[in-house]
Image (cartoon, rainbow, N blue to C red):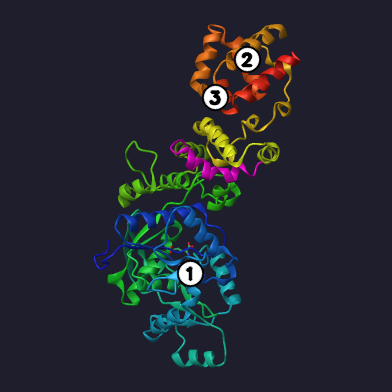
Amino acid sequence: MNKNHKRIRTRFAPSPTGELHIGGLKTALFDYLLAKQNGGDFILRIEDTDQKRLVEGSMERIVKSLKWAGLEIDEGVKIGETGKLVEEGEYGPYVQSKRLDIYRKYAEKLLEEGKAYRCFCSPERLAKLRQEQQKNKQAPKYDRHCLNLSAEEAQKKVEAGESYVVRFKIPKGETVFQDAVFGEVKIKNETLDDPIILKSDGFPTYHLASVVDDYLMKISHVIRGAEWLPSTPKHVLLYRALGWEKEMPYFVHMANILNKDKKKLSKREGSVSVEDFRNQGYPAEALINFIVLLGWNPKTEQEIFTMEELVEQFDLKKMNKAGGVFDLDRLNWISNQHIKRMSIDDLYNRGIGFLGKHGFYQRFLKRTDLSVEEIKDYVKKVLRVEQERLNKFTEIGVENQFFFKTAEELNFSLKDIHWKNNTAEDTKKALIEVKKVLEDIPGERWTEEYIQEQLLGLAGEKRGDYLFPLRWVLTGQKKSPSPFEVAWVLGKEESLKRIEKAISEL
Ligand code: GLU
């Protein structure tokens, strides 16, 4: 860290062009962890200087996704008490389109000092230049056509109403800076193009706006995707030109999240926005845990982390240089680990909204005569049985819809329920015995363990003869949680009803 920064201040600076991408979440997460670990500030700044790319409602969606993910914003744009977006903090405004005067002031300062110049080149001329450079296999670069315009000439053009941009004049020499992940970066300035810093519409470009804001907002660490590494020398030169080199933030460029082909993950791969994962029923802490390991290696055996543990253990020095590969199986595994650790009440509260969307559950609610409290208890029992195997909240109930159906709705063929070569007569006999055993269990002993003990006592060596048909009649499925668990959840009355129905039809 630069010793001129007294406090760790990080900023996440998304452009409001859509949903929050998981790559953005990764950046925000590292910003957050570094700030929290050091008692510093995590700032949200909105970079909306490219007005053509703005998407209505995007800013709000980004802020909401961050909140859902558990990344509380200390300063900048956040959700206020009324649920509306507000700006908080002493370095505002935090939305760049509200800061145009500030950027203009610095662009003018650079112009006055001869460190920037007005460029009147038309888009046509620039396109032609690019074409020629391409033909000659040269890197595209502005040819400084307007650099040598005299002050008077430029002034005349301005007065004649000619449209212009302001370009930063890249000085001669070499630029060197330290990056936390990529180490020392060194570049010959002659390879850099004179970047536009102020556009003809009076808006700054990203380069100027981000440098000015990072300085004025006293940002200590700039954490962002590796795609910005090539722009950083220009930023370093801007800091110098503006006389702010001593306050320059420490740069941390993170490798991008990759797909299985080791290419940058894109929308074509399916879900990439935080909102998608939220809608799919992944708990926020699971997504965070998954994302953090795509950019950071704890170098211990630990794989499952809570946010508190991450804040404690995160170490900038252990950031990965290579991009982590997005692996859905891994996300599912991590998510399952988090769900397993939830209390049943927590799982219920967070999962019930997802269960409520399924038609089978809505039909159950319509026909059941259980009270609201009884339904809640019943669903919690289902969750107890399913918890171990759930990867996400949307899976609740789906594999085990028999919990929410009537015996009539189960709809299975009695032919399937015989164990091996057993006849219908054998099955019927077995079910009659099962029924008797279950009938004798007093209501208060109706627990999974006791049911199991009693039924195993009955079956002895012949488990298949008894338990195979029992599972079928309780669930209508060949695969399910154990019949003891199922009977426990269904309750004595409903279990007996299902068994009796099969007996009468055999
Ligand atoms: N607005 C830029 C983006 O959305 C921010 C890059 C930076 O953090 O400097 O990627």
Q: Which residue is mark 3?
A: 485
**Which structural element holds mark 2?**
helix
Question: 73 and 209: which one is in front?
Answer: 73
Which mark's residue is nearer the viewer, 1 or 3? 3
Q: Amino acid at mark 3?
A: Glu
**Which structural element holds mark 3?**
helix
The residue under the point 60% across, 35% down is 397
- Position of 323 with respect to 18 (left or right) is left
The majority secondary structure of the magenta stretch comes to helix
Q: Which mark is residue 455?
A: none
Q: Amino acid at mark 1?
A: Val
Q: Which residue is mark 2?
A: 435
Q: What span is in magenta?
A: 340-358
Q: Find residue 61 and report its image quarter.
A: bottom right
- Position of 343 with respect to 442 (left or right) is left
Q: Are marks 1 and 2 in contact (CB under 8 Å)?
A: no
For the residues labelled 1 and 3, the Cα–Cα distance comes to 50 Å
